[in-house]
Image (cartoon, rainbow, N blue to C red):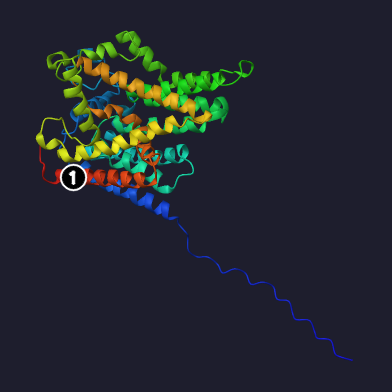
Amino acid sequence: MARKRAPKPVHAPEPPAEQTGITVPVETVVLVLTCLCYVACSAYLCTAIVRGDSPDEAAHLEYIHRLAADFHLIDFRGEPKGTETHQPPLYYALGALVALASGHSLLALRLLSTLCGLGSLWLTYRLAQAWLPGRGFGLHWACAVVVGFLPMNLYVCSAVNNDPLVNLLVAAGLLCLWRSRRGAGGARRALMCGGVAGLAMLTKSTALALVVCGAVLYVVEVLSVPRAERSFRRPAAFLAGFLAVWGWWGVRNTLLYGDPLAAAAFSSLAAGAPAQELGAPGAAYWLGMVAPFTWMTFWGAYDHLIHPDDFMPTWWYLLLAPVVAVAALGVVERFRRGLEREALPWVLALAAGLLVLLAGFVGFNLNVFQAQARYFFCFLPVLAIALCAGMVWCGRHVARAGVITLLVLLAYGSLEGVAWRMWFTGP
């Protein structure tokens, strides 16, 4: 008989080799390097900008130091023109704590703005991911780069002022609102969104755009369901969260100045040339002065707009115009094709917020000439995402050419602004 073969021994599978390295996605590395580059540029500007040389920095510093002395709120009706004591107190209270902890260090106060700007860059990336799902990393990254390296925003985020903090809080509020869409989180999330909106309004009144945006979003959400299923719990929770944080300031302003925003009282203190002396409200004023100065100060102008070297070269502004025009055409084309049902409440809410900013800007410039586009910067993430997405909606090749052109121009503008500070020594 043939002998049976002995069965082969069965060996247990070898355990996988132990992994000692950590795989980091390329996107994460690029984003971290971008953030480090932003911090390096802003930190350098924090050391290079002459004290009080950035817009209204001297007035912001005075408010911080006065608040640090006794933490006593100021009635600004007796203050001189150009004061910042009419502003809500959150940024100045935080600045006073930083001043006391750092021995009133100017650098520490400016680095606070740098950190706020870094947060806005990161939140813009997250918003782009949320609003443009399915798109590649490059588009989301480009949106963040526009916010971080827009020359005027980089400059503002390297000086003492309340713009970087309000911009950060508005971006956080928009992301909070997005995460609460379609009832996610219920009334608790809506309450938190209202609280973030209240913090933003305690920083600067331009945050009213976020409040209106949230209110419109929640009301449209309620009206979009059948009448029998409607509940106003979430809009009420948003309003309650907002009033719980900001309400005391509105009551104080009403008792002191006659309205919650103290707008009428502030109009008598606004610094700048009276609009009527420059031709307001005629077309020459709006088209010949306000429009071009707003365009230049949105992209890259520095200081108080009084030095010829405050502005970038004319060709730089001209090259930006077709890029923005292409993006605008892409946005129009996207609307022409129609919007998804779930996108409509967001479009209405964001449009309402932008209209609030525009109305405030026009009203301000009817009183004094203050055509500085940084008053729109609290919605800069929205504008940056619309700009980059608009080029994508024009087609792949147009998007590549447009986004690359935009980023190259912003890189040149940022480097020019940083390099300019290497030799500029004063006003």
Look at the image and tell me whether residue 312 can be seen: no
Instruction: Relative to 423, say whether 271 is above or below.
Output: above
Residue at 19% x, 45% y: name it. 418
Residue nearest the observer in this picture, 194 or 297: 297
Which quarter of the image is occupied by the N terminus?
bottom right
Residue nearest the observer in this picture, 203 or 75: 203
User: Viewed as shown, does residue 304 lie left or right of 401?
Assistant: left
Tell me residue 144's x, y (percent). Answer: 36, 42
Q: Quadrant of residue 139?
A: top left
Tell me residue 176's x, y (percent). Answer: 47, 32
Callout 1: 10 Å neighbours few (<14), some, many (20+)? some
Tell me residue 118's x, y (percent). Answer: 34, 41
Tell me residue 153's x, y (percent). Answer: 27, 36
User: Label 1 sits on what residue type?
Assistant: Glu
Q: In which quarter of the image is residue 187?
A: top right
Which quarter of the image is occupied by the C terminus?
top left
Residue at 31% x, 22% y: name it. 358
Look at the image and tell me whether residue 329 can be seen: yes
Residue wearing tag 1: 416
User: Viewed as shown, does residue 424 lie left or right of 173?
Assistant: left
Q: Residue furthest right?
A: 1
Residue nearest the observer in this picture, 95 or 51: 51
Residue at 61% x, 18% y: name it. 226
